[in-house]
Image: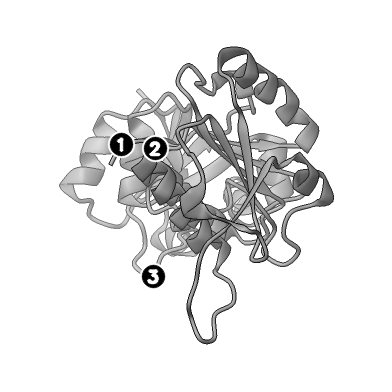
Amino acid sequence: MPQLVTVYSENATFQQLEALKHNRNKRHRQKLFLVEGVRLINNLIETDWQLKAFLFSKDTARSAWAQSVLNNSSAEIHYELDAPLMTKLSGKHNVSELIALVSMKSADIETIDVSMPPLIVVLDRPASPGNLGTILRSCDAFEVNALLTTGHAADLYDPKTLAASAGSFFAVNAQQLRSHHDLVPLFDRIKKTHSGLQIVGSSATAQTSLYEADFSLPTVLLVGNEENGLSHFYQSTANLTLTIPMRGKAASSLNVAAATSIVLSEARRQRGWL
């Protein structure tokens, strides 16, 4: 039975919870993050992520869904908040009925399944939580084996990232790595299991069309920073550089999330999984 804690004011407990919403450093120091939204919470419940607490308004009638979630909760604590506090903590126009407090997972590339030729996305210093969340959604839609970020990047656990994932955050093996060097053991493991590891970059000036590539091979798709593109390391690591054919009058390039989705859709089509 979860411990019930009532929060009546912006006390130390509330301030700690609010800091997790706004402060990346505090999230990662405490290894905790907040989750809200019906789809995200439903997906969370079906996973092995550690649920620490649920937060809800003590003054608002709950739906059958919210009451069922609380009745079956595995959380250690239930925080009941005054309605104004719940409103302040929620990131939604219509205040969420429930907010979950969840423990982060440590990055572990050994959890990435490479038994079949994998399809993996590596984001090089993504700057936008919105783009990161949208790419998470596409990785879920096209059953990517893992999404990895490297370098100083947007936070996977940012509320904006979670919201943009539209419920897909808990459906994807997504990990934040400190450096591109952390990828080496993963690449070695793929090479031991399969031949022909394909590390794919993209460029508007590339000579090879996306539709000429063979995505039946084990593939790592490199996605560059929104403003600066791929780092020199990743440019030199890629053994294939592709372009997405376009005929627009004004558009010379695509948003990074849109471009990634197009590539993943083609990879999925070639693998016969659609």
Pinpoint residue 11: horizontal percent, then vertical percent.
Answer: 61, 52
Q: Amino acid at mark 2?
A: Glu
What's the distance in space between the residues labelled 1 and 2, CA to CA? 9 Å
Residues packed near mark 2 inside 10 Å, few (<14), some (14 to 19) or many (20 plus) = some
Picture disc at residue 273: 1
Pinpoint residue 128: horizontal percent, then vertical percent.
Answer: 62, 61
Question: Residue 15 versus residue 263: which sits nearer the camera?
Answer: 263
Say if 115 sits above or below 154 in the image.
above
Q: Are marks 1 and 2 in contact (CB under 8 Å)?
A: yes
Q: Amino acid at mark 1?
A: Trp
* Extreme-left residue of the structure: 64
Say which element carries label 3: loop
Say which element carries label 1: loop
Q: Amino acid at mark 3?
A: His
Residue at image position (58%, 29%) is 105
Determine whether, in the image, residue 70 is placed left or right of residue 7: left
The reply to whether residue 174 is in sight is yes
What's the distance in space between the residues labelled 3 and 2, CA to CA? 31 Å
Picture disc at residue 143: 2
* Extreme-top residue of the structure: 192
Picture disc at residue 18: none
Q: Sequence order check: which comes first, mark 3 or mark 2? A: 3
Determine whether, in the image, residue 41 is placed left or right of residue 50: left
Residue corresponding to mark 3: 93
Q: Sequence order check: which comes first, mark 1 or mark 2? A: 2
- Please identify the quadrant where the C terminus is shown: top left
